[in-house]
Each structure stands twice: as C-alpha cells, then as structure tokens.
Image: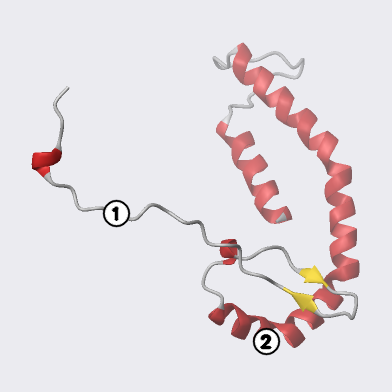
Amino acid sequence: MRQIIFTAIAATMLATPAAHAQDGTPKDGASLIEEGARMFFDGLMQETRPAFEGMKEMAERLGPQLRAFAQEMGPTLAEILKDVEDLSVYEAPEKLPNGDIIIRRKPEEKTAPDLPVNPEDEIEI
C-alpha cells in the first residue's frame, strides 16, 4: 500500500513542471497554478511522512505474524471462499455466548413476479 501511495505522489510530482530558480519563482513558463500544485504536494508529503513512517514500523513489527497467519489459514480460507459466491448476501458474523460464530444469510427481498405484457391491454394517454 505504501508503494502505491508513494508512486502516485511521485507521478503527480513528475507530471507538474518543477523547474524553478533558486529564489523559488516559476520559470520556463510555469504558471501560478502549477506552482501552487507543487507547493500543495510538497506540504502534503511533509504532513504524511510521519504517518508513513509509523506504518512502516508497524508493518515491520506485524509482518512475520501476518505471514504465519496467511500460511496457516490461507488454504482453509480459500476453501471457504469457494463455497461462498457473494459476500454481500450474508449478515455480519455474530459470536454466540458459547463461542460459536454464526454467519447468517440476509433475508431475500421479495419482488413482484414478472407478468406477461399484452400489447392489447395498454392504455393510451
């Protein structure tokens, strides 16, 4: 995820011309909008840097545990997902007092049956 965000920011930065003189004024035809966009993305990168560093530390700390979980549970979850066609037809899991977990299907919506249309029955307005 971190790579995707950094790639998007880098692509945006490269898309805007950033040729500036030493005093920070735009040159080579750079407009004020381009300069504002560059300043915006510079500020955004400075503001998000601590969050990304925290995410990196958390990923380093949790990485081995997540890998072990994926290796253990991956095949079982894949088997379960083969039987589940569409997750949107199920309610959120519910944990019972005895520790069992139940995942119920959502009630099916009743729709009106499709009736055949007879062109002779139509009414002109």
Question: How far is the residue under mark 2 from the one under mark 1?
Answer: 41 Å
- Give x and y (percent) for residue 52: 83, 49
Q: Quadrant of residue 10?
A: top right
- Give x and y (percent) for residue 39: 73, 23
Camera sees residue 20: no
Q: Secondary structure at mark 1?
A: loop
Residue occupying the point 13% across, 40% down = 121
Question: Mark 1 Cα within 10 Å, few/some/many (few <14, many 20+)?
Answer: few
The C terminus sits in image quarter: top left
| Amino acid type, label 1 | Asp
Residue 47 vs residue 75, the one in the foreground: 75
Question: Mark 2 Cα within 10 Å, few/some/many (few <14, many 20+)?
Answer: few
The N terminus sits in image quarter: bottom right
Q: Quadrant of residue 49?
A: top right
- Give x and y (percent) for residue 119: 10, 42
Residue of label 2: 76
Nearest to viewer (mark 2 / mark 1): 1
Q: Secondary structure at mark 2?
A: helix
| Amino acid type, label 2 | Thr
Residue occupying the point 63% across, 44% down = 8
- Give x and y (percent) for residue 76: 67, 86
Using residue 10 as the reference point, say whether residue 29 is left or right of it: left
Residue 107 vs residue 43, the one in the foreground: 107
Residue 85 vs residue 112, the one in the foreground: 112
Residue occupying the point 51% across, 56% down = 109
Using residue 4 as the reference point, say whether residue 59 is left or right of it: right
Question: Where residue 35 is drawn, which disc sits there?
Answer: none
Residue of label 1: 114
**Residues under numbered marks 2 and 1 in contact, where contact means CB atoms less than 8 Å apart:** no
